[in-house]
Amino acid sequence: MKTLVIVAHPNLEQSKVNKRWVEELKGQPDVTIHDLYETYPDEQIDVAREQQLMMEHDRIVFQFPFYWYSTPPLLKKWQDHVLTYGWAYGSEGNKLHGKELLLAISTGSPQEAYHPDGRNKYTMEELLKPFHATSNLIGIQLLPYFIQHNAMSITDEDLNVSAREYVQAVRG
């Protein structure tokens, strides 16, 4: 299975979790790492290139830090421009049917914060509902999320475990 990992972190070099995940993925067979902020520093997305990349892979991974209960802005822009009517959805938009989507998310808050009684008042499942709707619309199978909470305070030991588990999730 060929996997495309779309990394969307505006400052990957300063990231503890996302940077480590990318390092762990490097060299994995049949895994393509595609850093949106590195590829498009001007945010001018090459839609045809992005669609071709998706066509060449069986599993798509969106790897990103959780920003304001959503994705970083370039990944949202990417979705708006790449997942087009007639290609990803609509009467003839079936190019992603049969593919898989994995969300790999880092959060700065502890897991308990994503609970009705927690600081954020909503679960991750509730906050990620737009991805379910998108998956349904474009005919892609949404896989169980891979989430690393406490990104700001994770220990090196826990980060190494997370990176190894992430590779397993990406590879299926």
Image (cartoon, rainbow, N blue to C red):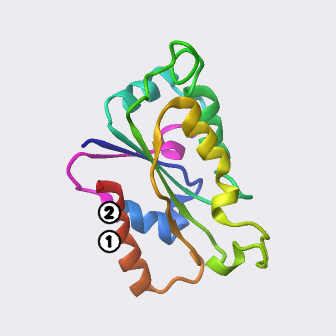
**Disc 1 marks which residue?**
164
Residue 84 appearing in the image: yes
Residue nearest the observer in this picture, 87 or 136: 136
At x 55%, y 13%, the residue is 91
Mark 2, residues whose alpha carbon is within 10 Å: few (<14), some, or many (≥20)?
Answer: some
Q: Which mark is residue 167?
A: 2
The image quadrant where one finds the N terminus is top left
Query: Magenta includes 66?
Result: no
Give the Cα separation between the discs numbered 1 and 2. 5 Å
| 37 vs 82: above or below | below
**Image x and y of residue 169, in percent:** 36, 61
**Image x and y of residue 84, in percent:** 58, 22
Q: Is residue 153 left or right of residue 95?
A: right
**Image x and y of residue 124, in percent:** 64, 63
Q: Is residue 159 left or right of residue 111?
A: left
At x 77%, y 73%, the residue is 116
Contact check, label 1 and label 2, Cβ < 8 Å: yes
Please report the bounds of the magenta region as a residue range.
Answer: 24-42
